[in-house]
Image (cartoon, rainbow, N blue to C red):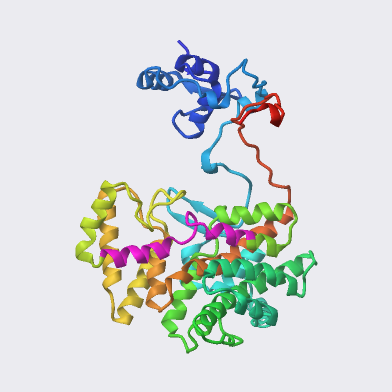
């Protein structure tokens, strides 16, 4: 007896159309393997599904059946396996970032990201991601000098920021402002590598200033000019709050920026690479990436964590809240990850800084609640806190409004986005995947007057 069946055999056994079998493979209901370049399904799994459905799940007539004007699909399309959300699909090669999901490691250009966060700086990591190596002292000093020339926003950008309605969210403003800044970039229209690197530097330096200038304007305050020679972390806090930032805040913020600098081919980075593959300019790629990050399934989780902790109200209420959420199958913000099968290596680092910052502020209740939520969740599930669970607590302890958490994500990830855009251009081929068609074909056109009402 054959151990594996073809799609055609499985469809016959289950009394469904072959396209339904492919859909079930795509959504994980049936596991498929490749045997001699063809798709095969374990016979036992097919028979088990047949017994479970007991013939009640019939052919999906919404996609049509043979003999009903569908037309034939090519053999290439028949063998396609759809991976919903491109789960575990390797879509290309990159030397920028590596995630070991089983061991819980994050690597930037060969260096452990946690080690970089603890011992390096965000600016040095930016150099590493863009140039592929760490700089020497003279190189790094010259690199830092290049940031100084980009530290002021174009006058036109500030004028645009003043025009936004109060209802505009910080992410909406950031998306539009970044798109407009391309018009006033001195290297606009130039595609040489040195020009594109200068664009990456300007974007990395100016996006924080867009965020802080708009936040001050919407609260009736004038933008604050950054201080040349200071770090991006320092100037973000300074231009946001208008006062000399606490050194511990600056250090913690720099660590958070470093840990968010890149994360392989996530949704926003993949978006940036797709746009770059069309040979669109760098500002288009970053604008598109911001648009992807704006979606709640990608960005915004750390903001939801703060809301959740405030709703719980204290560590003594954490156990009841978590168990109730689990019973109702409600997703707990800040937990779980598509790639990591163990602890997100960034979370413990940010947890330490969150503890330090909240103790320094004198208000540890949210942090204690977070620790209680983490413990109860660990005791009752196999999911772990991700980078979002403690990052928001760090920002909250610095007095940063929750609505800025996702824009902060964008300002740090700009380094990664631009590095991936540059890498995409080095060996470019337009990214153009295929889709498994599930609709009808060869339907005869009926004139409008003959279709009735």
On whether residue 28 falls in the magenta region, the answer is: no
Q: Quadrant of residue 223?
A: bottom right
Residue 34 screen position, x and y as percent:
55, 26
Q: Quadrant of the C terminus?
A: top right
Residue 340 lies, with reference to residue 281, above or below; the image says above
Residue 166 screen position, x and y as percent:
53, 74
Q: Residue at x 24, y 52 (%)?
A: 323
Q: Quadrant of residue 213?
A: bottom right
Secondary structure predominantly adopted by residues drawn in magenta: helix
Q: Can residue 28 be seen in this snapshot? A: yes
- Magenta residues, as a range? 288-312
Residue 237 lies, with reference to residue 267, above or below; the image says below
On whether residue 307 falls in the magenta region, the answer is: yes
Q: Nearer the viewer, residue 268 or 211?
A: 211
Q: Nearer the viewer, residue 208 or 341?
A: 208
Q: Residue at x 49, y 23 (%)?
A: 41
Residue 307 lies, with reference to residue 220, above or below; the image says above
Q: Residue at x 61, y 66 (%)?
A: 175
Q: Is residue 206 left or right of residue 51?
A: right
Residue 272 screen position, x and y as percent:
64, 57
Residue 87 screen position, x and y as percent:
51, 42
Q: Quadrant of the N terminus?
A: top left
Q: Is residue 349 left or right of residue 81?
A: left
């Amino acid at each position: 007896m054959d151990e594996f069946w073809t799609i055609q055999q499985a469809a016959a056994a289950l009394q469904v159309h072959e396209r339904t079998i492919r859909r079930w493979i795509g959504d994980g209901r049936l596991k498929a393997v490749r045997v001699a370049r063809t798709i095969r399904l374990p016979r036992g799994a097919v028979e088990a599904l047949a017994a479970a459905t007991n013939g009640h799940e019939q052919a999906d007539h919404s996609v049509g059946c043979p003999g009903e004007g569908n037309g034939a699909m090519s053999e290439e399309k028949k063998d396609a396996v759809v991976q919903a959300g491109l789960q575990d699909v390797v879509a290309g090669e990159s030397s920028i970032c590596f995630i070991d999901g089983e061991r819980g490691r994050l690597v930037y250009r060969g260096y452990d990201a946690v080690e970089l966060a603890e011992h390096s700086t965000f600016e040095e990591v930016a150099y590493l991601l863009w140039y592929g190596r760490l700089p020497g002292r003279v190189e790094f000093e010259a690199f830092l000098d290049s940031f100084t020339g980009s530290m002021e926003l174009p006058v036109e950008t500030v004028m645009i920021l003043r025009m936004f309605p109060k209802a505009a969210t910080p992410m909406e403003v950031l998306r539009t402002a970044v798109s407009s800044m391309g018009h006033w970039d001195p290297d606009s229209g130039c595609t040489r590598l040195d020009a594109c690197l200068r664009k990456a530097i300007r974007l990395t330096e100016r996006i924080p200033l867009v965020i802080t200038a708009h936040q001050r304007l919407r609260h009736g305050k004038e933008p604050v000019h950054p201080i040349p020679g200071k770090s991006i972390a320092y100037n973000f806090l300074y231009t946001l709050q208008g006062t000399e930032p606490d050194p511990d805040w600056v250090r913690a913020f720099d660590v958070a920026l470093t840990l968010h600098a890149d994360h392989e081919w996530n949704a926003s980075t993949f978006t940036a690479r797709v746009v770059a593959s069309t040979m669109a300019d760098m500002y288009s790629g970053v604008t598109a990436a911001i648009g992807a990050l704006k979606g709640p399934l990608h960005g915004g989780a750390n903001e939801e964590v703060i809301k959740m902790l405030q709703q719980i109200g204290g560590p003594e209420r954490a156990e009841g809240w978590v168990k109730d959420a689990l019973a109702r199958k409600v997703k707990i913000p800040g937990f779980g990850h598509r790639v990591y099968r163990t602890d997100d290596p960034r979370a413990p680092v940010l947890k330490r800084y969150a503890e330090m910052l909240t103790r320094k502020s004198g208000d540890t209740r949210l942090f204690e609640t977070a620790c209680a939520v983490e413990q109860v969740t660990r005791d009752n599930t196999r999911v772990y806190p991700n980078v979002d669970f403690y990052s928001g607590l760090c920002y909250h302890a610095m007095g940063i409004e929750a609505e800025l958490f996702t824009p902060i994500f964008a300002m740090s990830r700009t380094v990664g986005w631009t590095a991936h855009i540059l890498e995409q251009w080095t060996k470019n081929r337009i990214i153009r995947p295929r889709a498994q068609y599930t609709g009808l074909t060869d339907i005869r056109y009926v004139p409008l007057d003959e279709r009735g009402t």
